[in-house]
Image (tube, rainbow, N blue to C red):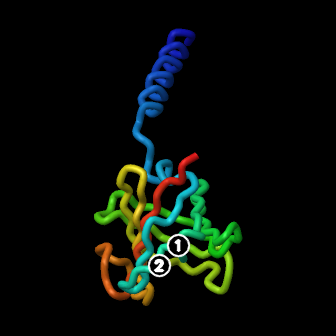
Amino acid sequence: MRKLLCSFVLFASVLFAAHAGDPPSDLDRMQGTWVVVTLIEKGKAVPADETAILEIVIDKNTFTAFEKGKMVVKYEIKLDATKTPKHIDFTALVGDDKGKTEPGIYAIEKDQIRFCLDDDKKGRPTKFEGDTFSVITLKKKPK
């Protein structure tokens, strides 16, 4: 019995060590505070002075947008990195749309994230462009 227990402990240690070296998930990579690089709404760029006052905080599975320090939106996010392009669902946690889910797509490239949503809420976008889409590019805020 003691030998079996020792074998199990050794196996569990090897298994844990293998997972500890796994690359971070997309959700892990999204954690932190982000600033807006660009924002395009329905095919039109929002001026930089309007986006400079925005800050995004992703904490666990919560996406919160702040404008001059005041919360303006808060969503629960759910990712599916197995899809191409990668899928994200934003479910509103506050406001008139509370409980409603908006499907989107996302891409992570180094220290930037891009999200795309269909402003007309006709479904999940399949690309990061279109005259009914909003595309926001975020960059990790330096510490």
Q: Is residue 105 toward the left or the right of residue 60 in the image? A: left
Q: Nearer the viewer, residue 15 or 75?
A: 75
Q: Residues within 10 Å of mark 2 (few under 14, many from 20)?
A: few
Q: Residue at x 53, y 65 (%)?
A: 77
On residue 47, the disc is 2
Q: Position of residue 30 (x, y in %)?
A: 49, 54
Q: Residue at x 34, y 77 (%)?
A: 125
Rendered image quadrant of residue 74? bottom right
Q: Position of residue 49 (x, y in %)?
A: 53, 74
On residue 51, the disc is 1
Q: Position of residue 108 (x, y in %)?
A: 38, 56
User: Given the image, on which type of amino acid does mark 1 rest?
Assistant: Thr
User: Given the image, on which type of amino acid does mark 2 rest?
Assistant: Pro
Q: Residue at x 54, y 77 (%)?
A: 50
Question: Farthest residue in the right direction?
Answer: 70
Q: Position of residue 17 (x, y in %)?
A: 46, 26
**Pointers 1 and 2 in contact (CB under 8 A)?**
yes
Q: Residue at x 57, y 58 (%)?
A: 58
